[in-house]
Image: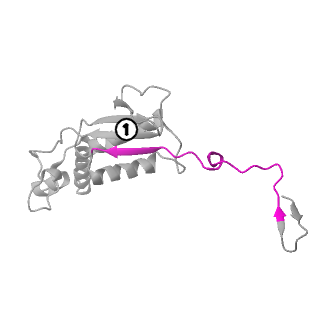
Amino acid sequence: SPVFESTAPGIFVIGALGELPARAEDTNPPPAATFKISGYGFLGDLRLKRIIKLLEVPKKTPEFFDANFMEDTALILKSKVREDGYLDPKIVITVFSDDKSKKGVRYFWNETEPLPRPLQGKEVRFKIRKGVLFHLDKLEFNGLTALTEKKTRSYFIETSGAVPLKQNRVYSPARLRRSVANVEQVLNRMGYQ
């Protein structure tokens, strides 16, 4: 920018020829898209949101979330909830297309049907409907002589508490597989095949 001197001592006039002040919408980036998870308790929602941010959201949050993000997030949520013993959770996705929209479009997500394309959301809400909590009611071991029943049971059920709680007996296929693999590993170390 050129500088013009005036005849008065100590006064300078700075001029910007041909330049107009920038408008706010030109300099401010558009607001980032947001997502919310609910239905799994305060701490559960926070834990799941942290997992999604770690796995799915890029460092620079996009202006809109697309259908791929929504499907991937729903799949991760369903997987985590199933791991906690709710084997048939339902995920409801509500998509708000812009900031001004007060009414969102609701989708009942499942793995077999993809969300419609193209689909973009400025705000996306994931509502978890947990369903029934599955837990181990009775656990028996037949033909097990190398380990005590109490020791073997500790691989399947947390036995450290004084009172047996349902939350310590949660059933999921993944937990059962892990428990069986741990018992097999212990038996292999003892020389059993």
x then y, percent, for residue 157: 16, 53
In the rendered view, does 32 fall on the left or right side of 166? right
Circle 1 packing at 10 Å, graded few (<14), some (14-19), many (20+), is: many
Q: Residue at x 79, y 50 (%)?
A: 19
Which of the pair 29/59 is nearer the observer? 29
Q: Residue 172 colored magenta?
A: no
In magenta segment, residue 20: yes
Location of residue 113 by image quarter = top left
According to the picture, the residue beneath numbered tag 1 turns out to be: 74
Residue 192 seen: no
Total tally of numbered discs in the picture: 1
Quarter of the rendering occupied by the N terminus = bottom right
Left or right: 85 as drawn, with respect to 123: left
Give the x, y percent position of residue 115. 42, 28
Residue 37 rendering spot, x and y as whole percentages: 35, 45
Q: Residue at x 48, y 37 (%)?
A: 98
Find the magenta span and give its range: 13-39
Q: Residue furthest bottom?
A: 9
Residue under the point 34% across and 53% down: 46
Residue 138, placed above or below residue 3: above
Towards the viewer: 187 or 53:
53
Q: Is residue 116 visible?
A: yes
- Local SS, label 1: helix
